[in-house]
Amino acid sequence: MLAHGSSFACMKPKSNTPNRAFKVADQIQRDLTELIARELKDPRVGMVTIQAVEVSPDYAHAKVFFSVLVGDPGECEEALNQAAGFLRNGLFKRLHIHTVPTLHFHFDRTTERAADMNALIAKAVSSRAKED
C-alpha cells in the first residue's frame, strides 16, 4: 500500500500545477503578512501590506510585491530584502511544502498610480464642470 502523497502525485494532470502554485503563493502572502507584523523588528519596515506573491514554477523563488502606508518605500524594500532569510526561515516552520522559495521583495506602485489617476480624473472632471 502506498502512503498518502506518494507517487500518485506524479499522475495528476498538469492543469493542477498552476492551481497549486496559486495556493502556495496565497499561503505565503498570508504567512508573510503575519510574520512581518509580529516578528520583524526593523524600524525601516513600517505599515506594510503584501499586495501579491508570484512563485516561480519550480518554487525556488517568490517575488513579493508590497506597499507601504507610512515610511520610505526604498528603505522598506532594502530592509525586507535584508530580512528575507529570517522571513523564509519563519515560512519553513509554517508551510508544509518541500521547497520554501527564496524571497525577493519589490515595492508595488499600483496603489500610488491609482491615486495619481484618481487625482487626474478629479481634476479633469472639475475643469470640465467649470467650462460647462
Image: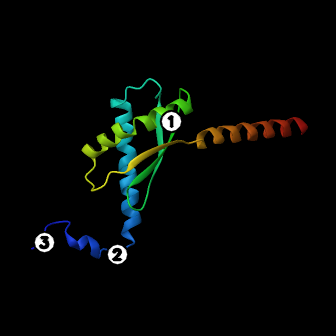
Query: Which residue lies at the image location 27% right of the left edge and 56% below the top edge?
Result: 98
Q: Which amino acid does label 3 sit on?
A: Leu
Determine which quarter of the picture holds residue 91: top left
Q: Is residue 75 left or right of residue 90?
A: right
Q: Which colour scheme is used?
A: rainbow
Q: Residue 24 carries which label?
A: none
Q: SS at mark 1?
A: helix
Labelled pair 2, 1 in contact (Cβ < 8 Å): no
Q: How many marks?
A: 3
Q: What residue type is labelled 2?
A: Pro
Q: Earlier in the sequence, mark 1 or mark 3?
A: 3
Residue 13 in the image: state x and y as whole percent.
34, 75
| Crowding at mark 3 (Cα within 10 Å: few <14, some 14-19, many 20+) | few
Q: Disc 2 vs disc 1: which is toward the camera?
A: 1
**Residue position marked by numbered label 3 in the rendering:** 2
Does 56 appear above or below 31? below
**Residue position marked by numbered label 2 in the rendering:** 13
**Residue position marked by numbered label 1 in the rendering:** 77
Labelled pair 1, 3 in contact (Cβ < 8 Å): no
Q: SS at mark 2?
A: loop
Query: Which residue lies at the image location 50% right of the left edge and 31% below the top edge?
Result: 76
Determine which quarter of the picture holds residue 132: top right
Q: Which of marks 3 and 2 is nearer the N terminus?
A: 3
Q: Disc 1 vs disc 3: which is toward the camera?
A: 1
Looking at the rendered image, the quarter that the N terminus falls into is bottom left
| Crowding at mark 2 (Cα within 10 Å: few <14, some 14-19, many 20+) | few
Name the residue nearer the viewer: 94 or 26: 94
Residue at the far right: name it: 131
| Distance between mark 1 and mark 3 Cα atoms | 45 Å
| Distance between mark 3 and mark 2 Cα atoms | 19 Å
Residue 69 in the image: state x and y as whole percent.
53, 30
Q: Earlier in the sequence, mark 2 or mark 1?
A: 2
